[in-house]
């Protein structure tokens, strides 16, 4: 979960709270009060057109007006925060391997994540770098090797990776992504994450076992989650699929990549 993910999550929470504040403001009285203290007692007055009307301590209007003003100030603060955070996210530049590598001219791009020094001075890969698979679940299933050393889970994914690599597209395999299902954060790993030169991220999912009921159910749930988070075909989501017999059409993959390249500057 990087800075952008954390900020997006905070924006999500604040937008929910702002909606509740606005609902309260509509229902609560839009009036003002003044007060006066004497002998340890507080006396509240309703102010309207420079006139004052005494409000007895038992009046529910006192609490309603206080809550109304609290909601109004909360809404102003949140609106200020949201405007500021959204501007920051628009201009914030990620510094993970895939994002930095994509910004480089093709001649200077690295073929694999660089090594950095850990706190004890020994070489270690930073967890932010795409291609660091130390925390990937079911690592034992990464049994298919590409020609450039990437381990993937299926032959179809290996072929897609080969096509992307041959085209010079910088991508990450199973890079963690935070999505939201209602107010719940959900962590997923898209098959491939591609960062365009304009900073836009495109996610590529290959659906390889749709004939399997459990697999297809999980795939449908994941696609629904993408849609809820504004990740949709063909703008920021690419989908490919095996044939019913389990075959993959490499020409179709290349056409998908051509269509993606036409809408986004990838290399």
Image: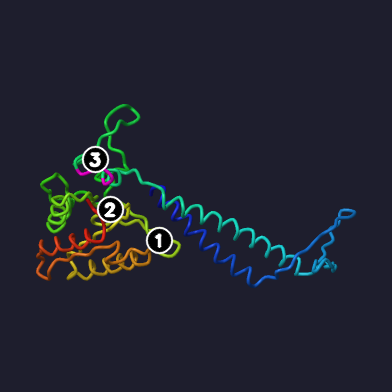
Under circle 3, the secondary element is loop
Q: Which residue is mark 2?
A: 196
Q: Earlier in the sequence, mark 1 or mark 3?
A: 3
* Label ID, residue 113: 3
The residues colored magenta run 102-106
Instruction: From the top left corner, tell me how far across and down residue 134 is, in percent.
Output: 26, 43
In magenta segment, residue 105: yes
Of badges 2 and 1, the one in the foreground is 2
Q: Are marks 3 and 2 in contact (CB under 8 Å)?
A: no
Q: Main secondary structure of the magenta part?
A: helix
**Inter-mark Cα distance, 1 to 3:** 29 Å
First reached walking from the N terminus: tag 3 or tag 2: 3
Report x, y in % for residue 174.
Answer: 25, 52
Q: Is residue 195 above or below residue 262?
A: above
Q: Is residue 147 magenta?
A: no
Closest to the observer, 62 or 48: 48
From the viewer's perspective, is 85 left or right of 48? left
- The residue at which mark 1 appears reads as 180
**CA–CA distance in space, label 2 to label 1:** 23 Å
Residue 224, above or below 78: below
Q: Position of residue 199 (x, y in %)?
A: 32, 52
Quadrant of res 212: bottom left
Q: Callout 1: few (<14), some (14-19), or many (20+) C-alpha neighbours within 10 Å?
A: some
Q: What secondary structure is marked by label 1? A: strand
Marks 3 and 2, Cα distance to the nearest angstrom? Answer: 18 Å
User: Which corner quadrant of the image does residue 257 belong to?
Assistant: bottom left
In this view, the mark in front (1 or 3): 3
Q: Earlier in the sequence, mark 2 or mark 1?
A: 1
């Amino acid at each position: 979960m990087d800075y952008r993910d954390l900020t997006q999550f905070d924006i999500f929470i604040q937008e929910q709270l702002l909606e509740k504040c606005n609902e309260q403001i509509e229902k609560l009285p839009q009036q003002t009060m003044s007060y006066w203290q004497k002998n340890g007692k507080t006396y509240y007055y309703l102010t309207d057109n420079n006139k004052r009307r005494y409000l007895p301590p038992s009046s529910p209007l006192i609490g309603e007006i206080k809550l109304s003003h609290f909601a109004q100030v909360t809404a102003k603060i949140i609106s200020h925060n949201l405007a500021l955070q959204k501007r920051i996210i628009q201009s914030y530049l990620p510094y993970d391997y895939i994002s930095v590598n994509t910004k480089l001219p093709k001649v200077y791009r690295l073929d694999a994540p660089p090594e950095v020094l850990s706190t004890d001075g020994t070489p270690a890969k930073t967890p932010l770098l795409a291609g660091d698979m130390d925390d990937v679940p079911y690592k034992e299933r990464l049994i298919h090797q590409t020609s450039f050393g990437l381990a993937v889970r299926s032959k179809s994914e290996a072929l897609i990776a080969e096509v992307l690599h041959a085209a010079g597209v910088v991508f990450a395999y199973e890079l963690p992504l935070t999505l939201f299902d209602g107010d719940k954060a959900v962590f997923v790993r898209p098959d491939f994450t591609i960062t365009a030169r304009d900073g836009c991220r495109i996610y590529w999912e290959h659906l390889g076992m749709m004939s399997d009921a459990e697999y297809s159910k999980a795939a449908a749930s994941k696609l629904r989650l993408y849609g809820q988070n504004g990740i949709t075909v063909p703008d920021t989501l690419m989908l490919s699929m095996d044939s019913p017999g389990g075959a993959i059409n490499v020409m179709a993959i290349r056409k998908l990549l051509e269509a993606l390249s036409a809408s986004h500057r990838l290399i």
